[in-house]
Amino acid sequence: MTQQRKALALISGGLDSLLAARVMQEQGIHVEGVNFFTGFCVEGHTHAIRQKDRHRPKRNNALWVAEQLGIKLHIIDIVEEYKDIVLNPKHGYGANLNPCLDCKIFMVHKALEWILAHGFDFIITGEVVGQRPMSQRKDTMPVVARESEAHDRLVRPLCGRNLPPTLPEREGWIKREGLYDFSGRSRKPQMALAAKFGLQDYAQPSGGCCFLTDEQYSHKLADLWQARGERRYEMDDIMLLKVGRHLRPRPHFKLIIAREEGEGNFLQGYRKGYGSLTPISHPGPLTLIDGTPDESEIELAARIVARYSQGRSAERVELEYQDGEGNSRRLSVAPIPPHEIPQEWHL
Amino acid sequence: VSEPRKVLLDARRLLCPMPVIRVQNAVAELRPGDRLEAMCSDPGVLHDIPAWCRINGHKVLESRRDGADYILLVEVGDQ
């Protein structure tokens, strides 16, 4: 009896990884999925935080893909280990702070560790030659296979016919003619294949789920490192970069101003450990203070927050200032006029 | 044969997928028939934990709201 071969598919929740796993299932391979949580895969977080998104149907796309495929999905928290990839990418960054090539190498290596520990035979990814400017080029795809140490146990079913034969092909576990030869940035072949498999309602192609590909997010992360004088981050930092309006009036402190109720509720959880300002005399946003403003700068911060409250046209706005240890006092300030908030304060 | 266990998991203040990961890791330590009660605050768990259970062969016996929290009772299936 032929041995049932087993593969682990990297499941991002997008169409390509869905199709890649499906193509292998067509060849009789037992497929399970793995999804790595880096902390930057944040679409779900944004939904959870922002009130205005709460009415939208929310789903975790990786779980949805696994359910469509009828496979198990293992979600692995790599937040701590991933820091080194973000902070010290051997192959550098893409257009923003996205270390795509190092990221792919790291994830494939983690998948390799998993298959060795669980008796699986090979790894599947949804990579397509020429699709992404950094990690999915003809010259970088062999780098992923080599530096992840997966070598020829890494199968890319959507473009495998453009690549040298892998171990599963040579051993006859899978048929090369059952692989595809997709290349380039066009999504049409994937959409046609999805239609062939009867797949609908898949996540729309985008720049991936990673916030590090986002220019504004990367700018805020770079600002954080510059203000701290060192390149490091904690989970709370990367969460807070997703929330609110960020203004840095001085190099040594910035304000995180809630834009709506959901963000205000979320920021409430951070009042212990951060200074905060809350308008009292008028409805207005809870604001965290990240840094160490002096007394006059706390007043400046209060004037900015007053500007974003419904008392923006009032002569004075009353606010509560609370330090990170819970000591509070009241302030009364004149809202700052908009022209006194330079554009460069906005991150 | 020992009695099925019931284990409590506090996943409040965590945003998805972290509560799912905590449930996954807790379930891995349990036996079929054991139960896990997860307390969560992200409403996304109402979708994600049942989805995770369906694809991994576990059952959500109960899903309810308790104030600001969401409580899900999971029965562990064959692993």
Image (cartoon, helix red, strand yellow):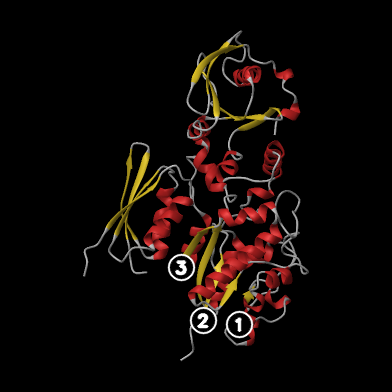
Residue type at tag 2: Arg
- Tell if the residue under mark 3 belongs to the same chain as the one under mark 2: yes
What number is the disc on residue A5? 2
CB under 8 Å between callouts 2 and 1? Answer: yes
Instruction: Judge left or right: residue B34 versus residue A64.
Output: left
On residue A120, the disc is none
Local crowd size for mark 2, using a 10 Å CA cut-off: few (<14), some (14–19), many (≥20): some
Q: In which quarter of the image is the C terminus of chain A?
A: top right
Instruction: Pick whichever of labels 2 and 1 is earlier in the sequence.
Output: 2
Front one among A64 and A337? A337
Rendered position, A127 above or below A39:
below
What residue would you read off at disc 1? Answer: A168
Q: What element carries label 3?
A: loop
In front: A90, or A167? A90
Residue A84 placement: quadrant: bottom right
Residue in the foreground of this view, choosing between A76 and A6 = A76
Give the residue drawn at x 33%, y 65%. Answer: B77
- Please indicate, yes or no, whether residue A195 appears anywhere in the rendered image: no
The x, y position of residue A18, in whole percent, is: 56, 65
C-alpha separation, residue under disc 2 versus residue under disc 1: 9 Å
Q: Mark 3 points at which residue?
A: A70
Frontmost of labels 3 and 2 is 2
- The answer to which image quadrant residue A252 occupies is top right
- What residue is shown at x 78% (from left), y 69% (from top)? A139
What's the residue at 49%, 89% (across, down)? A2
Chain ID of residue with mark 3: A
Residue under disc 2 on the same chain as residue under disc 1: yes
